[in-house]
Image: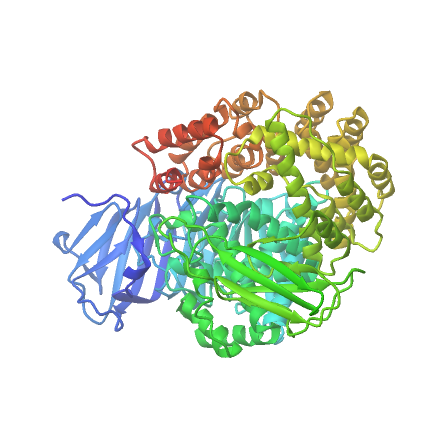
Amino acid sequence: MQTEINPTIRLTDYKPSPFLIDDVHLDVRLAQQRTQVRSKLKMRSNPDAADEIASLRLDGEKLELLGLEIDGTALAAGQYSVDESGLTILGPPAGSFTLAIETVCDPSANTALSGLYRSGGIYCTQCEAEGFRRITYYLDRPDVLARFTTRVEARRSEAPELLSNGNLIEAGEIEGTERHYAVWEDPHPKPSYLFALVAGDLAAVRDTFTTMSGREVELVIYVEPGKEDRCAWAMTSLKASMRWDEEQFGREYDLDIFMIVAVSDFNMGAMENKGLNVFNDKYILARPDTATDQDYCNIEAIIAHEYFHNWTGNRITCRDWFQLCLKEGLTVFRDQEFTSDLRSRPVKRISDVQQLRAHQFPEDAGPLAHPVRPDNYKEINNFYTATVYEKGAELCRMMQTMLGPEAFRAAMDLYFERHDGDAATVEDFVRCMEDAGGRTLSQFFRWYEQAGTPEITVESRYDSAERRLELKVSQTTAPSPNQHAKQPFHIPLAFGLLAEDGSDLPLPNSESGILELTEAEQKFTFEGIAKRPVISINRGFSAPVKVTANQSADEKLFLLANDSDPFNRWEAGQSYMIEWLARLVETCKRGQDPMPDQALSTALEAVLDNDNLENAFKIKLLSVPGEASIANHMGSDIDPEAIHRAYRFAKRSISTALHEQFLALYTGLETTVKYTPDAASVGRRALRNGALDYLVQAEHDAGRQLAANQASSASNLNDRMAALNALAQTAGKERDQALAGFYDANRTDHLLVDKWLTLHALNPAPDAVDAIQELTKHEAYSLKRPNKVRSLIGAFSMLNQLRFNDEGGAGYELVADVLMELDEINPQVAARISTSFRSWAKLEPKRRELAKSQLERIAGKASLSRDLREMTERTLKG
């Protein structure tokens, strides 16, 4: 009999675990090649499991089994069996029993960085989603919650710090040896994916936080020795997160200590392990000379995200991995709100929508499309996606829009009250929204079950004699894999009507300013409208949809100048520009000379002159949609070279038309004030550096010289990187000298070297692929270090659309070569970078065939991991 190597897991097949684990006692004796793990599991039969229990199946991978006992009696060889994916115990006892297991694993050989691994001298774990099974045999599923007590032992000289989840209850020396130990107790039941262990030579930065009930919590951030002076912002962000969660959601921290460990080799950005968060150090370490404004903002947001998981993810976890959006989408929504409160709400909303459109919309429109709650998967690591995270957050925001802020907060309170300590489902969460909000959300639930981005068409008809405005609004959603026919979504569309002077008109027949679209086509009528208004629809991006309205170019420019809703003001300008860019692309395809848009230049000049706009918002209004946005708008038969020429022309023409204004702006915003990462300072730098980018894009020697001067003399990394980013996308001695100088000055700092690799990845020159191929042999690059691969190959394949889509196919071949080699080392990272091929079927025919041939070459490799195989097979179905 043959079994499927990579079977499909289906939501409909979910069954409760036949066994539960109440308490876990782990004894982990660390050694570089042979770490011994002794686990003692207090288990019992699950009364909710209907199936007859003939055996106990525990998950396990890459483990050596040394011992196995039940209630103190060793099991004989015929009472159990071991295979490559787990351990089966035949005829387990009924009722309660204690299972003791002793295993050995090899942390140094674990290049996949899943489970317990050793990198850079640090022992570290990553157990989400299914890494705990690489530490010991276990019921490695999120609906089995247990209290953990963990004893960690190691040589003191190798690992002075021994950390795990919960509170430290004991520590000491092991007499007659150079080893020491620490015992950690976590009183809160948790699934195995939230287990964490870190050990090594780490420096500690300490502080305290007093909770709203008056308890003092110890805060500790552990980093590589010598990096302590880069932790101040992370600590500030942590304390701000703890206070905000108390004030906005009533959530208080529940342990005596909260720890963060920053490590340099990590597959993810960070992980919310209970009481012991593990972070990729790029999201912890910051100092004005080593971190950009975006780095500071990312640190603030990601620390908040992981901290907020303490309640939305840890105290209430997922019943199964199909419910991943229950913790991730909700927590993304919470961290977005946190940043909006601390910084600029309009700018944050625009930035989030830009990310959604750049990553999630293409996912929805291609072969990797899946619902926010998938109904099947082969490898769960492949579903940590923009759809689950970012679109999942949008679903929470839509429910807040429909219920209103007060009812939404009441629903969240009810959710925490009902499900604290549970492994919950999406149905549980939505039911709390219904019960607290007093309304049915059964149709809205389709957002969790149907993939795709709805396309909304708005047609308006104004009857001046009757003083009546009629809106006909329709929705369609394109077929996606395994979902050909889509039912209408429940879509809340915030809207407004603008008078001819730009002011908002009162909304007759609508107290809330929300149109709730529930049918394929609906009509909405508004009486008593004296003159034809300009319509502002989907204000604040109230629903993650694409909107087409019968608006003229003049109406879009009117909204850009006047809309009181900041998001739709920006949206109107982007819509105008994307239509112009699409025309430029067609002109470039025909080999004709593109033409500037004087009306747009005039509108942008008015934005520049408007002193009432905050700087961070102003640069958003001035920014041209990027090449990926243009490609997404074009839809099919995409020609990346024509798009690149159109984009560069658009930037150049705007810069030429407004050259004096940009130069005056750049000069006028210069300051000698000491660097701070506050919102106002970040906005000022963003606007000044946006002006510099336009000056460089004009392709004048003077602009490049300004950037070169700033790159060499800037007092902070943000301004230095802004200049280098502008230069990196040009050719000439200024670029080469600036990049070489940056590396020479920072070659010993791995985070700054990563930025240097990304600068090279953006190279638009015809020989870029050869240059990047050479960089894969450089001392600064390593295939075994995820941040290096993401910084060079990930950035090249995602951000350099011109050269990744090189007309000869060299970009595809380079990335395919790296993916196949990387897959043997770290399948998770390989699978995630492979998503750069997701839109191959929408390319023009020549590039389409070249990309397809490389995907087929990857798929043809016999030894692919299940991670990369699933992604490649799904992508090829495009």
Image quadrant assignment for residue 218: bottom right
- Residue 47 visible to the viewer: yes
> Number of labelled discs?
0
- Image quarter of the C terminus: top left
**Residue 227: percent from left, percent from top:** 63, 44
377 relative position to 709: left or right: left
In this view, 801 is above or below 543: above
Give the left or right position of residue 298, taking residue 12 as reference.
right
Q: Nearer the viewer, residue 469 or 424?
A: 469
Visual colour scheme? rainbow
Q: Relative to residue 764, is residue 29 depicted above or below?
A: below
Q: Position of residue 432 (x, y in %)?
A: 47, 74
Residue 344: percent from left, percent from top: 71, 57
Q: Residue at x 71, y 68 (%)?
A: 465
Q: Is residue 241 left or right of residue 111?
A: right
- Front-lying residue, 77 or 444: 444
**625 to 322, vertically: above or below:** above
Vertical comparison of 162 with 282: above or below = below
Task: Report whether residue 179 is seen.
Answer: no
Quadrant of the drawing holding the N terminus: top left
Question: What residue is at 54 percent from the left and 37 percent from the top?
Answer: 798
Relative horizontal placement of residue 452, taking residue 766 as reference (left or right)? left
- Spot occupied by residue 590 in the image (x, y as percentages of width and height): 60, 26
